[in-house]
Amino acid sequence: MRTLSLVIFAFGIFATSIAQSYIQIVSEPDIKVFIDGKFKGVTNADLGGFIVEGLQAGEYAVKLVKEDCIPQLGNVKLNYGDVHVYTSKPFAPKISIAQSGNKNQSAEVYKKMLDMQVKTGSLKIQSLPVQIQISIPGAGITSQKTDDKWLANEVVAGSYPVTYSWRGYELKDTLTISPYAETFVFVDMLKLSVEDRTQEQKSVVKKEQPEVDTEKAAISVAPVKTSAAPVPAESAPALPAEAENRPGASQLSGLAPEMDLKGVEMVLVEGGEFKMGSGEFEKDEQPIHAVKLGSFYMSKYEVTNAQYCVFLNEIGADEDASYNGQEYLDIKSRDAEIKYEYGQFVPAEGKENFPVSYVNWYGADAYCTWLGGRLPYEAEWEFAARGGNQSSGYKYAGDRSVSRIGWYDLVSKQSPREVGRKQANELGIFDMSGNVWEWCNDWYDKDYYEKSPVLNPPGPEEGAEKVIRGGSFFSMADICRVTNRATLAAKVNDMEMGFRVCKPIR
């Protein structure tokens, strides 16, 4: 019995050592490292950073602190035995706040920003009542507002969760600071609403909360859920010239605004012309170029686990989710949300309406073909994500704030979420920014925009990897932009990969 106990004890030590995971912090020297709020050590030049040992699988909050600078916050998800490399960004000096609305940033801090080539903007806040608490941890801002016009200068550009507090009530929102511009918001704690008054915006974006429940100590602004949405489709004939880009073109063409394909809701995306790409971000998003598309249908939601199970069962896929020797889905992963039980494929309990994941390009393409559609071409995907002919020109699919319309790293808890739970875009399509990456039909070519045809561009004839769009629950906010392009080998099954269906109008 004693021998058995020793063997069990030794095995426990061995198993624990195998299960350990690590975070390698890559940063300049003398940076304090905190994991889940606990101090772990200081980076040094010999290691080029710091190594956090003895961690188990799970999610961890990382905080890096440099004296007189804004702390850097992030999240890391570890699997058993992982060594996760976490690289810091350049540290920005702490921000000074002016209560009068006048610029108050020192020349020294501004010079540091320029030397570091950090893009910054300013943030102006008015509120009712005047005296509220403002907390923006990601930008290093915690301030008691005491005057009418509150102004923070040289705020590092990006999207930040923000909390406004007053007399025990909390109002949560997300702010986007644009480079070299001023963001201006009005916070009404009496109505629990936030109004964007940025001068550059052509229209006011308003988000409201139901009446205050005085028994609750904290209230968050909930995203507004809309009812309409679109679907992906093939290069279709262009609309007649007199019908293009006109409200009500669907009535003119006799096309139904919505349709159903074997239980998949599809929404009409009317054809039109738009400027594809961006001149501000990555080189493969350039040049901005004109694209003209015919009408098509796009699925309102990302394809779900329940919908994909119907497909696998109907075609008689093998129990490893392959068909005719081609794997469609990685069903063996411990995180897979589709199981094979008693001779059929079923979604994991409670995951029926979550987006199918771990699906490769071949599995996505086969589903779309079975449904009578196909994967969207990249141009169709971007046109639909922008809102088609109803586009408001947002950075993300339906709003200038990604938190309102998408699941990304700061709000997702590092896992996919049920489809359709955030606000839809102008066309009524859900989750085109975040949740899961979406496969496109096209091969990827970083220089394709330089030679893309104007009419219904089909992408390159060949390539090494396929285009993926939209970002995922594990992506930073900027990755979820409607113009962002990424690429992945067609055979790869990944937890972050999903898709939606497009049906061309013949």
Image (tube, grey):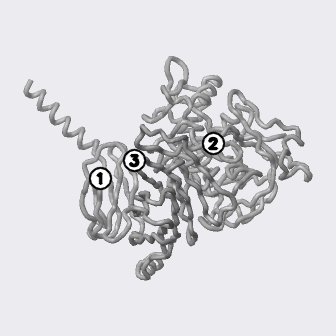
Three-letter amino acid code of the residue under disc 1: Gly
Q: Earlier in the sequence, mark 2 or mark 1?
A: 1
Residue 210's image quarter?
Answer: top right
- Residue at image position (51%, 63%) is 125
Reply above or below: 181 against 176. below
Three-letter amino acid code of the residue under disc 3: Gly
User: Mark 2 near mark 1, Cβ–Cβ under 8 Å?
Assistant: no
Q: Which residue is mark 1?
A: 37
Q: Which residue is most to the top?
A: 342
Q: Which residue is mark 2?
A: 430
Question: Could you say where residue 6 lies in the image, as x and y percent from the top left?
Answer: 11, 32
Q: Earlier in the sequence, mark 1 or mark 3?
A: 1
Count neighbours of disc 1 (C-alpha within 10 A) and say few if under 14, some if 14 to 19, many if 20 or more.
Answer: few
Disc 3 is placed on an element classified as loop
User: Mark 1 near mark 3, Cβ–Cβ under 8 Å?
Assistant: no
Tell me, yes or no, if residue 291 can be seen here.
Answer: yes
Between 396 and 440, the residue placed more toward the observer is: 396
Three-letter amino acid code of the residue under disc 2: Phe
Q: Which residue is mark 3?
A: 168
Between 389 and 366, the residue placed more toward the observer is: 389
Mark toward the viewer: 1 or 3: 3
Left-right relation of 112 to 10: right
Residue 195's image quarter?
Answer: bottom right
User: Mark 2 near mark 3, Cβ–Cβ under 8 Å?
Assistant: no
Question: Could you say where residue 56 lies in the image, as x and y percent from the top left?
Answer: 29, 43
